[in-house]
C-alpha cells in the first residue's frame, strides 16, 4: 500500500505490514520443512536446514514486499519477472551449465542462486566455505532492499500512482 493521504509516514506504512509478512514467510517455510520430513528426505544438518529455509523465505518475502511497497502494481510485475527468470536461471531445476547463454549470464545476479546454495549446503553436507559467501550475499540483499525501499518509497509512491492509473486504464491487471 501507499502512504499518500494518510497520517502515517512511508516508514510506518512499510514496517507496519512487514512483521505480518515475516511471520507468513516463516510459516510457509515451516510447512515445506515439515513436508520434507514427512516425505523422508534426508537432511544432513537439520538445524542449519531449518534456519536456512526460514532465512531464504524471509529474504525473498522482503524483496517482493519491498518491490510492491515501493512501486505498487509495477512492483508486482517486476516480482513476477524476477520469479520467471529465477526458475530457469538459478540451477534450481536444471544445472546452469546446460541452460541457455542468457540464463548463464544472469546466474550470478539472481538472488535465488544464493538461496539454493545455502539450502543445498545445509541439506547435503555443510561446507562453510560454500555457505558463508552465499549467506552474506543474501544478507546484503536483505539489508539493501530495506534501505533502498525506504529511500525511494516516498518518491516512488507518486510515480507508482501514475503507473497504477495507466495499468487500470489498460485492463492488463
Image (spheres, rainbow, N blue to C red):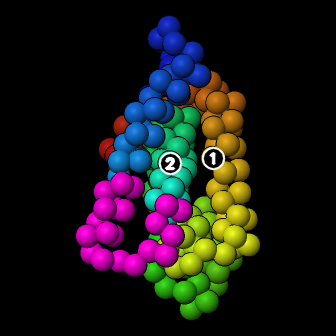
Mark 1–mark 2 Cα distance, whole angstroms, equals 9 Å
Q: Are marks 1 and 2 in contact (CB under 8 Å)?
A: yes
- Tell me where residue 127 sits by quadrant: bottom right
Q: Is residue 17 left or right of residue 129?
A: left
Above or below residue 85? Residue 55 is above
Question: SS at mark 2?
Answer: helix
Residue 97, image x, y percentages: 61, 89
Residue 142 numbered mark, or none: 1
Which residue shows up at 46% across the image and 59% down it?
50
Seen at 35% across and 77% down, the residue is 41
Helix, strand or loop under label 1: helix
Is residue 45 in view?
Answer: yes
* Circle 1 residues within 10 Å: few <14, some 14–19, many ≥20: many
The residue segment tinted magenta is 29-48
Q: Residue 29: horizontal and vertical position, in percent?
A: 39, 55
Query: Which residue is outermost to the top?
Result: 7
Residue 168 lies in magenta, yes or no?
no
Which residue carries the number 2 mark?
58
- The question of residue 38 being in magenta is answered with yes
Crowding around mark 2 (Cα neighbors within 10 Å: few <14, some 14 to 19, many 20+) is many
For the point 56% across and 78% down, the residue is 125
Amino acid at each position: 500500500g501507499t502512504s499518500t493521504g494518510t497520517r502515517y509516514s512511508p516508514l510506518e506504512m512499510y514496517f507496519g505490514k512487514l512483521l505480518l509478512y515475516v511471520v507468513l514467510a516463516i510459516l510457509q517455510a515451516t510447512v515445506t520443512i515439515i513436508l520434507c520430513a514427512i516425505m523422508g528426505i534426508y537432511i544432513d544438518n537439520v538445524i542449519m536446514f531449518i534456519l536456512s529455509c526460514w532465512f531464504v523465505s524471509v529474504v525473498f518475502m522482503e524483496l517482493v514486499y519491498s518491490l510492491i511497497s515501493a512501486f505498487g502494481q509495477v512492483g508486482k510485475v517486476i516480482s513476477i519477472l524476477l520469479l520467471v527468470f529465477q526458475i530457469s536461471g538459478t540451477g534450481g531445476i536444471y544445472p546452469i551449465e546446460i541452460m541457455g547463454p542468457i540464463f548463464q549470464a544472469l546466474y550470478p545476479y539472481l538472488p535465488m542462486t544464493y538461496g539454493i546454495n545455502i539450502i543445498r549446503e545445509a541439506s547435503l553436507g555443510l561446507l562453510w566455505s560454500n555457505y558463508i559467501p552465499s549467506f552474506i550475499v543474501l544478507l546484503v540483499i536483505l539489508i539493501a532492499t530495506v534501505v533502498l525501499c525506504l529511500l525511494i518509497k516516498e518518491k516512488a509512491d507518486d510515480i507508482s500512482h501514475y503507473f497504477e492509473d495507466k495499468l487500470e486504464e489498460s485492463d492488463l491487471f
